[in-house]
Amino acid sequence: MSAKAVNGDILQAIGGIPSETKDTVVEAIGVDKYFGAHQVLKDVSLTVKRGEVVVIVGPSGSGKTTFIRCINHLEKIQKGRILVNGHLIGYRERNGRLYEDAERNIARQRREIGMVFQRFNLFPHLTALGNIVEAPIQVRGIARAEAVETGKALLARVGLADKANSYPAQLSGGQQQRVAIARALAMRPSLMLFDEATSALDPEMIGEVLEVMKELAREGMTMIAVTHEMGFAREVADRVVMMDEGRIIEDTDPTRFFTAPASDRSKAFLARILR
């Protein structure tokens, strides 16, 4: 069985990835996004297969974060469409036109998509375990005893078994981000999105969060990660996607991207970020 076998430790701890019949998890087709008159995404298309790890890189302002926020409809698109597990995200199609879906349906779709942000966004009044079990109980209707058991297993898996009763203010930045990852996993998503998950951390804490992300990748979780951690991209990514000025300008395997990038813009970006 490959290193990306889907029955790895983390996925076992949460009961596995939800069974899906489609091999394609994410399909973005011709996506445009505007903030006012400013176009931040320009005809962006991307397909991500089940079990793939796609790392998106590029300069600040290139549209990376906006794009992954569109995947779970935290940002609305103005053109194109995004499908997750074959289902339109955020919209319903009628007579060839797209109409924004009801909020309850959008919330239901988001259950299948875990997202880890730059900031940890933990509830300060809840313990680490409390943060993890809240959504499974309230949103998925999972029994408290089951949610607590799963939450403890996830905390152990991210190296925080002894922090179950600690509050966010008692945890380091790296520990808080690992709790945030465990919280996202507790919803049993079929897709994980990471938006610069290490950018708010002190350098010595980055490694502990990246290690959890690497473990997830090895165990078969479908992932899209926006990051400046080039070592992570080299080691873990199946594909590296380079964005610039709202467009995807390169989509290739890590070896080719880091040794022989096709575009001059990618070459300039790597020369600056790897020096």
Image: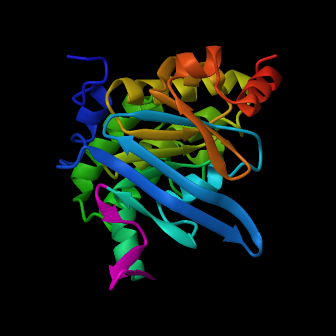
**Where does the image place residue 202, in percent across and percent down from the top left?**
74, 30
Q: Which of the 4 image quarters holds residue 153?
A: top left
Q: Which span is picked out in magenta?
A: 85-99
Q: Which of the 4 image quarters holds residue 138?
A: bottom left
- By secondary structure, the bulk of the magenta-drawn segment is best described as strand
Residue 229 vs residue 264: left or right? left
Residue drawn at point x = 40 percent, y = 72 percent? 106
Residue drawn at point x = 72 percent, y = 65 percent? 39
Residue 233 vs residue 99: left or right? right
Q: For residue 93: magenta?
A: yes
**Where does the image place residue 144, in percent across and percent down from the top left?**
26, 57
**Where does the image place residue 163, in percent across and percent down from the top left?**
49, 35
Q: For residue 268: magenta?
A: no
Above or below, comparing residue 93 to residue 22 in the picture? below
Q: For this rendering, which residue is in front, 171 or 69?
A: 69
Q: For this rendering, which residue is in front, 57 or 248?
A: 248
Residue drawn at point x = 28 percent, y = 51 percent? 147
Residue drawn at point x = 79 percent, y = 21 percent? 271
Identify the image quadrant of the C terminus. Answer: top right
Residue 70 vs residue 47: left or right? right
Q: For this rendering, which residue is in front, 16 or 66?
A: 66
**Where does the image place residue 102, in percent across and percent down from the top left?**
39, 83
